[in-house]
Amino acid sequence: MLLWASLAPLLPSPCPEYLEPSAFHRTIPSDYFQAAALARLVKHFGWTWIGAVRSDSDYGNNGMAAFLQAAKAEGICVEYSEALYRTNPRTKVRRVAEVISRSTARVVVAFIASGDMLVLLSELEGKVLAPLQWIGSEAWVTDRKMLRYRLFAGAIGFGIPRSVIPGLRDFLLDLGPAQVSHSPLLTEFWESAFNCSLGGSQTAAGRKTCDGTQNLRDLQNPYTDTFQLRISNMVYKAVYAIAQAIHSIICTDKPNAPPHCNTSIQVEPWQVMEHLRKVNFSRNGYKVSFDTNGDPVATYELVNWQVMRDGNMEFVTVGHYDASAPDGQVLIMNKNITWAGDQLQVPVSVCSESCLPGTRKAMQRGRPVCCYDCVPCAEGEISNVTDSLDCITCPADYWSNAEKDKCVPKPIEFLSFHEVLGIILAACSVTGACMAFMVAAVFYRHRDTPIVKANNSELSFLLVFSLKLCFLCSLTFIGRPSDWSCMLRHTAFGITFVLCISCVLGKTIVVLMAFRATLPGSNVMKWFGPPQQRLSVLAFTLIQVLICVLWLTISPPFPNKNMKHYKEKIILECDVGSAVGFWAVLGYIGLLSIMCFGLAFLARKLPDNFNEAKFITFSMLIFCAVWITFIPAYVSSPGKFTVAVEIFAILASSFGLIVCIFVPKCFIILFRPEQNTKKHMMGKMPSKSL
C-alpha cells in the first residue's frame, strides 16, 4: 500500500521534487519480489515446464516480465505466455483457454487480476481439462470470490500476510443506527446488510424500516471477518509508519523518562520523508522498515486452496516466504499441501523426463533447454547424478560399469595358472619336462649300448638336460608378471635355447667330423674331440649369457600395464625394455639354428651309421618353421595371447627336437634291441628301422 495518500495533506500543492522515487514508500512489497518468490516456489517443487497467463495491464505485464526473468535464471522453461483482459472479445479469451487445455505443461502460473481471472475461468469451466496445478499471485489467490470454482482445488500462491488488528472487530461491531445514520456510506452498508431502511434514507425504497434490533454481531459476512485482513493490515502499518515519523520529529525520547513532545513545531514534508526512511518498529506482530528504495522486507504467506471435510474450500497457510532470511530458510513449508485434483504427490510438469545416472542431456534443436533427449554415456564415461549435462571420463585405471554410473577398476588380464589356456600350456610344459626326464633315464639305463655311444652320449645327456630346462622355462611365462619373473623368463628362455641349439650344433659337427675321419689319411677328429665339443657348447652359450647380461644392465624387462590395446581392461605384460636386447637374443638363437640346419642338411645323405643328421635336419626344420611363424604371430597377438604364442613356440620347438632326435633312438633301445648292436650301427646299407 502506498504511503503517498497519507503524505499528500502534508505537501504543498506545487511540490514536484517529492514525486521522485526517493519519496516513494510502500508497505506491500514490490511485484518484483513476488515474481522472484513465485519462481523460487516453482523451482522448489521441480517444475521446469510451465504455462503462464497474465493480465494485459501494467500489473500483469510487468509482473510476468519479472517472473519470466527470474524463472529463466532458475532453469524453468515456459511453454506459452498468454495475456488477456476482462474487456477482450470472447474469441481471444477462448483462444487463451484453448492454449491452456492443449498444452503439455501441467502447471500454470497466473499473474493476473481477480476480474480477469473470473473471465478466464468462465471459459475454462466448460472444457475437459487434465488436472492443472495453478500458481497464483496475491491479486487473486486470496480472493474469496474464487472459492466457488472447483477448478482451483489445490491452487497455491503467495498472499499478503494476514493479521488481526487489535480492537478493530469491536470497533466495527459496536456501530449502532445512531452512528451509522451520520455517514451515507455506512447507511448504505447497514441497509444492504439487514435489508431494511433507516429513517430518511433515499436508497431503501420499498424496504421495511429498521426497528433498532439489528446487531452487526449477528452477521456472517466479509465485514465481520476480521481474521483475514491482508490489505487492511498494510494500511494499518502505513498509518503507524507516518505516525512514528511525525513522533520522532516532534518528540524527544530519553531513557527512563517520558517523551517530551512539542506539538507547536511546524512539520515540513521533507522532515517526514527523512524520518520515514529511518522507521524501524514492530506493530501487530510485524516489523515495519524501509530500504533505500522505499521497499519493505518482502514477506508473504504461502496459501493453499484445500477442500475441507464439509466440502467447502478454504485458504490454508502452508508456508512463509521471507526474502531477508538466510539461504535455505527463505521459503519454509510448515504444513501438508493439497495438490490439483486428487493427487497425493507433487504433480510432475516437465518437458522431458529426468535423465538418469548413466546418461546425459542432449538438447533438442529449436526447442527450450528444458526439452532434451537422454543420451547414454560413451564407454569409459559416467554420469553419477540425475540430469547431468556432460559425462565424466573415468581415470586411466578405471572403466565405466554396465550402468555407466560408476567408475570401476579395470580388470587386469594376464595368462594365469587358473584359466584353461594357462592350465593346458602348463600341463604341456610339465609333460615335456617329464618326457625329457624319461629319455634321460632310458639313455642312462642303456648308456653302454652302441646306439647311445655312437650318438655322443655326453652331448646327448646335455641336450636332454637343456630340453628339460626349455620345457620348464615356459612356466615362468605363466602367472602375474613381476620384476623378477619378467627378467627371468626372457633370459632363461634365451640361455636354455642357446644351450640346446649349441648341443645340436655340436652333434651335427661331430657327425660331419666323424665322416671325414673315415676318409684315408684324415685325422680331423683329434681337432674336435670331447674337450672341443664341450668348449664349443660353452663358448656359444657364454655369448648368449653376455647378451643377456648387457640387456639386463642397460634396459631390463619390466612389468607394464598396457592400456592402449584394450580400453576396457588392462593387459599386465612384461615389457621387453630394450628392444635391441630382446631381438639380439632371438637373433642369436636364429643364427645358431640356421647354422645347425645348414650343417645337418649337408650331412643328411651320409652313410647309415651317421643317419642322425637326417633327424637333426628334420628337427631343425621344425624349429626354424616354428620361430619364423612366431614373429608375426607374436607381434599381432593381443594381450595374454602374446604370451601364449611365445609359450607355444617354446613348447613346439622343444617337442620337435626331442621327438625327432631322441624318440627314434628310445624306440630302438626299448622295442628293437636287436638293432642296438655295433654290427648294425656299422652297416653300409640304408637302415630300414631308422
Image (spheres, helix red, strand yellow):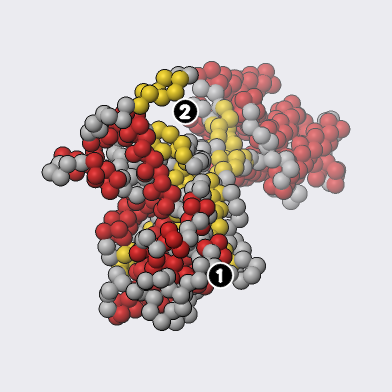
Residue 578: where, in percent of width, then height?
49, 26
Q: Position of residue 152 (x, y in %)?
A: 49, 68
Instruction: Find residue 580 and name its label.
Output: 2
Point out which mark residue 255 bears. Answer: none
Numbered disc 2: secondary structure: helix
Q: Position of residue 348 (x, y in %)?
A: 52, 62
**Residue 566 in the image: x percent, y percent?**
52, 45
Q: What's under tag 2, amino acid-wise?
A: Val
In the image, is residue 614 above or below residue 366?
above
The answer to which image quadrant residue 58 occupies is: bottom left
* Residue at 80% across, 38% down: 434
Dot 1 falls on a residue whose secondary structure is loop
Query: Is 367 rendered above or below residue 2?
Result: below
- Residue type (three-letter) at the residue carrying disc 1: Gly
Residue located farthest toward the left when viewing the structure as drawn: 14
* Dot 2 crowding, Cα within 10 Å, few <14, some 14–19, many 20+: few
Report the front residue among 86 and 284. 284
Decide if residue 190 is in sight here.
Answer: yes
Q: Give 140 or 10, whichever is nearer the viewer.
A: 10
Q: CA distance from mark 2 to mark 1?
A: 81 Å
Precedes in sequence: disc 2 or disc 1: 1
The answer to whether 569 appears left or right of 184 in the picture is right
Residue at image coords 71%, 46%: 419
Identify the residue at image location x=61%, y=29%: 486
User: Total of numbered circles in the picture?
Assistant: 2
Tell me the mark number nearer the camera, choosing from 2 and 1: 1
Q: Which residue is mark 1?
A: 341
Residue ID at (47%, 70%): 193
Q: Nearer the viewer, residue 348 or 175?
A: 175
Q: Is residue 533 left or right of residue 217?
A: right
Q: Is residue 604 visible?
A: no
Query: Is the residue marked by circle 1 packed among few (<14), some (14-19), or many (20+) residues within 10 Å?
Result: some
